[in-house]
Image: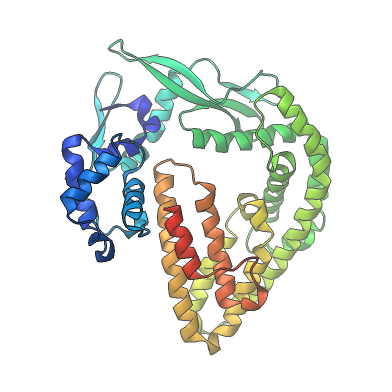
Amino acid sequence: TIPLALLNQLDATQAEWLVPGMIRDKLTWLIKALPKTYRRVCVPVPDFVTAFLQANPVAEGALLPKLAGYIQQRTGLKLGVDDWQGELPEHLCMNFRVVDDKNRELGMGRNWNALRQQLGQAAQLTFRSASPDIEKTGLKQWDFGDLPKTLSFNRQDSNGERRQLTGYPALEDQKDSVSIKLFDMAAAANQAHRAGVRRLMRFELKEQMKQLEKGLPGFNQYALLLRNLIAPDALREDLLTAIADRAFIGEDDLPRTNAEFMTLKQRARTRLPAVAEASARLAQSIAVEYQELTQKLNSLPNAMSRIKKEAEAQLALLLPAHFFSQTPWERLQHLPRYLKALKLRLEKYPNSVERDTRHAQELARLWQRWSERVEAKRKAGEEIEPALADFRWLLEELRVSLFAQELKTPFPVSAKRLDKIWVELS
């Protein structure tokens, strides 16, 4: 049973270990669900389960990675969490019951992510209603003292029981101002705080930003080329957001005190002109490649409908709404090359249909595996670790290697290498 206010703070990986009487059944099922190559080295299964539990006397961390690591340690075989086949039976999953302050049931089920999606927002509101008086609104300068990374406080339910909660204070961007908000998840707080710091810095350097807004280098030219993708006003704001993020924060630590914020401001003022120039050049390069690619797409005959549909899907992934501010700065530099590679693929396709199809299937396998993992983490409210986020860009480099080798990649890349990296990620 979980109080609503604690829903977003619960580490669901602990529940994967069930209770001592049931964990053996779950481990037995998991071993039998492995591909034969792995399964045959884990026999006799009861003895293997006993040995695993003895090696892990404390139920700590996610179960599957622990089991995969143990199998590798015992057998030398590398195993990823995606190698398990089939869906775990319901009776081997923990049953969660979420209640309010008066112990009234709000939801129950064995799918933790579904419960979080259903009740996560209500949990955040309940959490904040009991939080200390730290939240503020209408801020336009850092005049509110220090902002701690965490804040512990007690919450009393209707039965008089007191529970200690941990909150994560962060700045939150409200566009025309900034607010201080207490989050119940560190990942959400970190994301909000970066955007909040960025907005507060734009208020501090409003004259420089106003001047930049009126005179983004070459804006009219690349805005015209990108007009079918994004409206000029939206593109301008997206560029300003990306420039602000790179110039104001970049790789620096996010400030938690006024002194840290002011130090960041001095660096930001110095970096702003160079970042703006670099961003304008990059926007121009992206716009030119986009224009050439879309012209090629529009000229494709009906017989190439499959590759056209696939290319349009990839283009949408490379250049989504707010692509300039949402794409990591170091990857933005490579977008022109990725777009050019896609155009070259279309040009080569009529003479290499079979080869293209084979490569496309290999990429689809890798992409599906990655996207499913990312989606599961998002649903669970978990932060996407850098290595997993980077894997998405390894896939783009693989596309270049397979379809446009003449453009070259910064490092060797192949499906086999990516499979190996994926196992290590798992």
The quarter of the rendered structure image containing the N terminus is top left
Task: Judge whether residue 225 can be spotted in this image.
Answer: no
Coloring scheme used? rainbow
Q: Quadrant of residue 269?
A: top right
Which residue occupies 58% across, 66% down?
397
Residue 210 percent across, percent down from the top left? 80, 40
User: In this rendering, would 237 be left or right of 76?
Assistant: right
Q: Quadrant of residue 379?
A: top left
User: In this rendering, would 211 be left or right of 243?
Assistant: right
Number of numbered discs present? 0
Residue at far top of view: 160
Which residue occupies 41% across, 60% down?
369
| 371, above or below 245, in the image | below
Residue 386 percent across, percent down from the top left? 54, 48
Which residue occupies 65% across, 72% down?
408
| 67, above or below 340, in the image | above
Task: Judge whether residue 118 can be spotted in this image.
Answer: yes
Residue 123 percent across, percent down from the top left? 38, 29
Residue 327 percent across, percent down from the top left? 61, 53
Q: Nearer the viewer, residue 385 or 123?
A: 385
Q: Nearer the viewer, residue 187 or 5?
A: 187
Which residue occupies 66% across, 68% down?
337
| 380, above or below 103, in the image | below
Q: Nearer the viewer, residue 75 or 399?
A: 75
